[in-house]
Image (tube, helix red, strand yellow):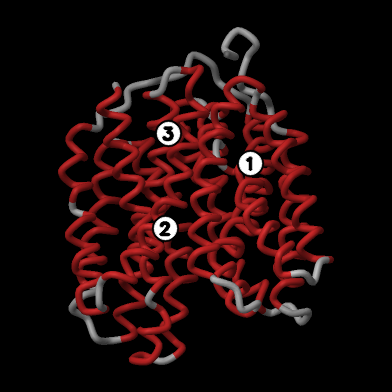
Amino acid sequence: MLRQIFSLLTIFLLAALSVYSISFVLPSLSTIYGKGIYFTVPLSWIGGAIGGVALSILADRWSRRFSLLISILLFTLPLLLNSVIRDLSLFYVLWFLIGFGVNGENGLSYVYAAELSPPKYRGLVGSIMQGLYFVGGLLGLIWASVFKLNLYFLSLGVVSLISLALWPLIPESTRRSRSNPSAHGLFKITFLGAIFSVGSFLFVVPLVSLSFTLLSLLNLNAFLLLSIALLVGMVGFTLAGRISDIWGRKRTTYMFIGVSLVFSVVMLLSGEPLLVEISLVALMVGSSFFAYFGIWMSEIFPPEIRATGTNTVFFLGRLIGGGFGVSLVLLMPFGLKDDLGISLVISSILVLIAVLGLPETVSQGRKG
């Protein structure tokens, strides 16, 4: 079981590294292809929204293991092709496919994590998995500082092929439920989960994507501060999962939403660079309400539709928060710091509204 979980986590990390990789070389690519290259990021999220649902339907109806293989191929091979193409329209196609594959892989990984992990450690495994997005972002940041552009995507593509070597270690899922939940109950869970997902992606994606720019505008050491924030965020995600295994998913979520609301307001109202720095780090920790969300949804949906249900919940989050979240923030007229602060406050409130109606999945007998 440990070998399977380790393989799953490694594949997830390589997927996260792949989808974040273009963000750190966009300025260099824009000197070659113009500002149009920036549209690759929302296109990858739009591809992810579609790919997550499409591959999860395939997984539930046919084979989760085979769907996982397709998702791996869809982000590893296009990533390699980035090193040889020289046409902007082909970049758009490749990054749509990379997003399609990465988010398909992510959704299946949450399901596998819920089924392979011991029940009292599901939150921990899920949050470690979700925290690997911070690690992927940090690795991409370092990778871009080490490799020149012509070797950057080639080296990343070669490393991502490790996913194919690990895929044979992932088993086929055979779990089935003994109950048939009502259509009304499933609709309520899907609706509230979608609100939670939209709020989470609108929180996390702009926060991670725009922090470097904001810190740079404030004439601060953006590389150092963002590296620290990402590392702190990773630790926060890991602790959040274990706390949710002990305290329960809902109570833990309330705690982290509280942190997010407080420091979103602090950043919005403060003009001091030091308070902005502290707020950004604290907000990375506050975003830990998203750490175990994939596991939480996988626990709620019955096994027959677990992949489809979980990825349907993630669909609007990936589409709105991932595909358009950064653009929505940048379209606000108040200045980047205030624009981001307003977005984070609204996102936190959306998550709070959703969590009020979601069921708790950690029973008293499982806590500890």
Q: Is disc 1 placed on a helix, strand or loop?
A: helix
> Hey, what amino acid is under mark 3?
Val
Name the foreground residue: 312 vs 248. 248
- Crowd around label 3: few <14 · some 14–19 · many ≥20 (10 Å): many
Horizontal side of 115 relative to 214 (left or right) equals left
* Numbered badge on residue 111: 3
Name the foreground residue: 338 vs 272. 272
Name the foreground residue: 288 vs 280. 280
Horizontal side of 63 relative to 176 (left or right) equals left
Name the foreground residue: 305 vs 200. 200
Looking at the image, do the residues carrying marks 2 and 1 touch, with CB atoms under 8 Å apart? no
- Residue 282 position, x and y percent, is 66, 51
Q: Which residue ends up furthest to the right in the rendered image?
A: 269
- Residue 68 position, x and y percent, is 29, 43
Count of marks overlaid on the render: 3
Give how far apart the Cα atoms at labels 2 and 1 are: 20 Å
Q: Which residue is mark 1?
A: 289
Q: Up-down: is 194 above or below 331?
A: above
Q: Which residue is painted at 46% across and 78% down in the image?
A: 39
> Hey, what amino acid is under mark 1?
Phe
Q: Which residue ends up furthest to the top in the rendered image?
A: 365
* Quadrant the C terminus occupies: top right
* Numbered badge on residue 138: 2
Q: Up-down: is 293 above or below 200?
A: above
Rendered image quadrant of residue 157: bottom left
- Crowd around label 1: few <14 · some 14–19 · many ≥20 (10 Å): many
Give how far apart the Cα atoms at labels 3 and 2 are: 25 Å
Specify which label sits upstream in the sequence, 2 or 1.
2
